[in-house]
Amino acid sequence: MSFNAGAVIADFPILSRTVRDGKRLVYLDSGATSQKPTEVIDAESNFYRMHNAAVHRGAHQLAEEATDAYEGARSIVAQFLGASVNEIIFTKSATESLNLVAYAMGNAPAGNRFQLKSGDEIVITEMEHHANLIPWQQLAARTGATLKWFEVTPEGRLDLSNIDSIITSKTKVVALTHQSNVLGTINPLSEIVKRAHAAGGVVVLDACQSVPHMPINVKELEVDFLTFSGHKAVGPTGVGILWGREDLLSELPPFLTGGSMIENVTMTSATWAKAPKKFEAGVPNMAQAVGLGAALTYLNRIGMDQIFSHEKALTKYGMSALLEIPDLSIVGPTDLEMRGGTLSFTVGDIHPHDLGQYLDSQGVAVRTGHHCAWPLTRKLGVPATTRASFYLYNTNADIDALVDGIRNAQKYFG
Amino acid sequence: MQLDNLYQEVILDHYKNPQHKKLSPTYDAQVHHINPSCGDEITLNVTLSGDTVANVSWDGVGCSISQASVSILSDLVLGKTLAQAQEISDSFMALMQSKGTQTGDENLLEDAVALAGVSQYPARIKCALLGWMAFKDASVQALAKNQ
Ligand SMILES: Cc1ncc(COP(=O)(O)O)c(C=O)c1O
């Protein structure tokens, strides 16, 4: 099937509404959250309309249907990532997934491979979203482990030149982003994974900005944990995924405790169910999980290869159009290899907040600020940037609207 | 264009020629405030003489709204008593919360009425208030120190 952006746009009802007094909505903020196709909206509301019941609990038909739908969604996610079903944990978001891993490691007793203590090292990078930075920073503070990080080069790539001193025999965990939500940089993983494993550590991959945009197979990536948020992958809010290798999930202690995650309970003790249940305490976000299943089915039908190439073409077009604008500088790699469809930039002395406001008045939705990666923007010496992020429903016409908007803003604030 | 309600000429003037944007070497209180949602930062110094604002100076980075707002504020409160400054600040606060229903008391707020349009853009109210919150904080600290 060849990619047809026009047909894709028709699948997303919100894209036919107007904003700011009749302007066509030009949505370039999918890095923050994606829009949803009708079949996802329907899947979520049909769950409530027809099948709603607490999964894994009731002794009735609805409970059976709800459980089938919820577990069906788990299979879809597993297939989408090339994983086994029991390795897929539903969380409420990537933020929760990352906290789950960090807190669970913090709960690990002596003798458990995940136990962290003074002298152990946790490695992150300077380009992490706060969601993959603060949980590790705080885990280090709680356990006495040392936090280390890879720096970012002026071009916006990871500086791996000192990998020998960053990943050492003391490394217990390396947590990094697959694709930067600010720079668009796609990080090379193989060397990092090889070193981390040689040291006996695990690799946690924040795939929030990659899973929605490119084909991903966890087995090929060889990482140990991976997370993404449903809402950035045309799915609902309130559902995220944590994937982990089966053997690791069986050794990792739980994070949240409560209903559904137990094997046996007495007044003074409890034992845990096997993964994934061990990590899914309480009645989960069922309708959202079902919606995510519909979202990944939708993306699969379009084809992740097709989506990746479409975004690559948009990025190429967008990059050259933006670079023609006087005073505009791209923050992040300007070569198209190993980068995705996220373009952050500054425009002369126009503050991003003002630029974003102007673009909004033209119907163009972008994000401005530090994009929850404050240490990164500080490092790059910009207090804030404007970010345009692309997805399958964007077209060159959207980029043209962005470019016109920026040029007009230069006149307005000039 | 509706945007012109937000970006009044007065605001762009203050943005391009900010008033009192040079930190004084001495002060009774210095505060540093940050808007965590967008990264705007301001450092603001206050010196009192009795209960009169003898000097206000600041430095910072931010959008036109935050920069113009603190520039206007500095002009406004300089030479006023803390009670007068409080009255101005209360009136400005009310204007920001007005969702576009008020135009502001020009006798009291002077140039600050140009920021009335901000109240129609909920995401920008925090930008406009950054300097005002910093001033409030600094004047309380300065007063405590001098007592
Ligand atoms: C790279 C990256 N990591 C983590 C997150 C956090 O995702 P969520 O807010 O959905 O938990 C985001 C989303 O902003 C992101 O872009």
Image (spheres, rainbow, N blue to C red):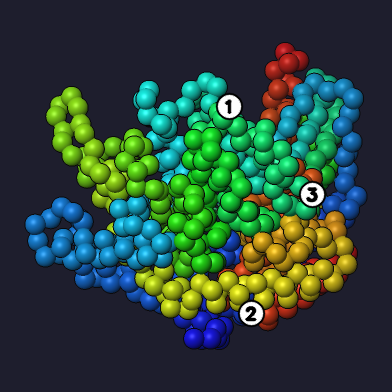
Above or below, A359 relative to A119: below
Front residue of A382 and A81:
A81
Crowding near pointer 3: few (<14 within 10 Å), some, many (20+)? some
Q: Residue at x 45, y 47 (%)?
A: A225
Residue highlighted by disc 2:
A395
Return the x and y of residue A26 as percentages of the image width and height.
63, 74
Mark 2 residue element: loop
Q: Residue at x 42, y 28 (%)?
A: A115
Return the x and y of residue A381 as percentages of the image width and height.
79, 45
Return the x and y of residue A260 as percentages of the image width and height.
22, 45
User: Which of the 4 image quadrants contains residue B28?
Assistant: top right
Discs 3, 2 touching: Cβ within 8 Å:
no
Q: Is residue A254 left or right of residue A51?
A: right
Q: Chain of mark 1?
A: A
Crowding near pointer 2: few (<14 within 10 Å), some, many (20+)? many
Q: Residue at x 43, y 78 (%)?
A: A301
Distance between the Cα atoms at labels 1 and 3? Answer: 26 Å
Both on one chain, marks 3 and 2? yes
Front residue of A280 and A158:
A158
